[in-house]
Amino acid sequence: MGDVKFSFQLLDKGNPVFSAFIMWASVLTIKFLLMSTLTAIHRYRSKTAASPEDMAMMRVTELTTNEEVDRVKRAHLNDMENILPFLSVGLFYVLTDPSAMVAIWLFRVTTVARFVHTFVYAIYVVPQPARAICFFTHFGITFYMAFMSILYFI
């Protein structure tokens, strides 16, 4: 029973690692949710309907594609593939009772990497390796936290 109580203490607002995780995870969740809005803005500006029922509302006569819309959609998909695993792995990592300084910096850096990834891919296109650096930064941090969680819990 002592371990269960100890785990719940880690999930308390008084734990700086848990508080930081909740804050940065919330920032990433909001960013993730806003990608739909960014897609809609690009669709509206370029008059790119997503479906036949949208054509009448947008006053367009044919379904077309648009590279800017597709870039934002791909960035959103990339967020889905990376932010969602981070949300669960980050919580597991909190339960390992890591160093507060290390954990908080990992949460900060991975959040910045996701924002920069979207910026250099969907807002202001920058040639590679800018996007790859951002992707592998986030991927590496998530992988590290998952690996440390496995080591802790086996």
Image (spheres, rainbow, N blue to C red):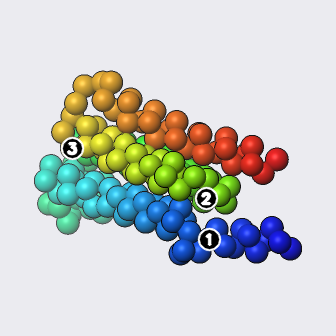
Q: Describe the element under mark 3 as helix, strand or loop.
A: helix
Q: Position of residue 14 (x, y in %)?
A: 54, 74
Q: Residue at x 38, y 36 (%)?
A: 134
Q: Is residue 29 above or below residue 119?
A: below
Amino acid on which the number 1 mark rests in the picture: Leu
Percent of width and height locating residue 13: 53, 75
What distance separates the C-alpha of mark 1 from that of mark 3?
36 Å
- Name the amino acid, label 3: Ile
Point out which mark residue 123 bears.
3
Sequence-wise first label, 1 or 2: 1
54 vs 111, nearest the viewer: 111
- Write down the residue under mark 2: 94
| Residue 73 vs residue 134, the one in the foreground | 134
Query: Whole-percent x and y of residue 133?
Result: 38, 30
From this viewpoint, is residue 105 visible?
yes
> Residue 132, located in which quarter of the rendered image?
top left
Give x and y (percent) for residue 9. 66, 73
Task: Please report contact status of discs 1 and 2: CB closer than 8 Å, yes or no.
Answer: yes
Residue extending farthest right: 1
Marks 1/2: CA–CA distance = 8 Å
